[in-house]
Image (spheres, rainbow, N blue to C red):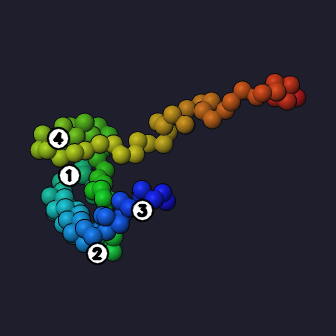
């Protein structure tokens, strides 16, 4: 860890209790608001033993854009945090392969 990161961390540490209480309360608020909505699955976390920084939900792919628009209209920031691995550039055919600096090695 760099000295700068350590300094920022130490400055934030004084506010940790307030920040963790707020994050836990927000997560519980989202959990309550999303409970019972058909097609929305909350990825549960143990908020008594962790400090969630995201409220992750699963929605059917066919509904995602509609859900995103509806939440954004309400001022809720949303996004596809982790697109599926098979859609990542590193998963494309040929990704991670590089031309051999010695073509004769490849052909043998």
Q: Which residue is mark 4?
A: 72
Find out whether the residues at labels 2 and 4 contact each other: C-beta distance under 8 Å: no
First-in-chain label (2 vs 1): 1
Find out whether the residues at labels 3 and 2 contact each other: C-beta distance under 8 Å: no
Spatial CA span between label 3 and label 1: 44 Å
SS under mark 1: loop
First-in-chain label (3 vs 1): 3
Across and down, in percent, residue 84 comes to 44, 42
Q: Which residue is mark 2?
A: 48
Identify the residue at horizontal 47%, vertical 36% (top origin): 87
Q: Which residue is mark 1?
A: 38
Across and down, in percent, residue 106 comes to 81, 29
Left or right side of 46 for 96: right
Identify the residue at horizontal 63%, vertical 35% (top origin): 96
Closest to the camera, between mark 3 and mark 1, is 3
Spatial CA span between label 3 and label 2: 26 Å
Closest to the camera, between mark 1 and mark 4, is 4
Q: How many residues crowd mark 4 within 10 Å: few (<14), some (14–19), many (20+)?
A: few
Q: How many residues crowd mark 2 within 10 Å: few (<14), some (14–19), many (20+)?
A: few
Q: Which of the two residues, 70 or 22, is positioned nearer the viewer here?
A: 22
């Amino acid at each position: 860890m760099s000295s700068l990161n350590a300094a920022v961390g130490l400055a934030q540490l004084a506010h940790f209790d307030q920040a963790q209480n707020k994050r836990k309360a927000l997560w519980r608020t989202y959990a309550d608001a999303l409970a019972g909505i058909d097609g929305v699955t909350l990825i549960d976390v143990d908020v008594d033993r962790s400090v969630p920084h995201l409220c992750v939900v699963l929605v059917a792919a066919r509904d995602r854009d509609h859900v995103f628009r509806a939440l954004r209209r309400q001022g809720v920031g949303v996004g596809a945090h982790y697109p599926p691995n098979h859609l990542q550039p590193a998963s494309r055919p040929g990704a991670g392969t590089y031309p051999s600096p010695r073509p004769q090695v490849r052909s043998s």
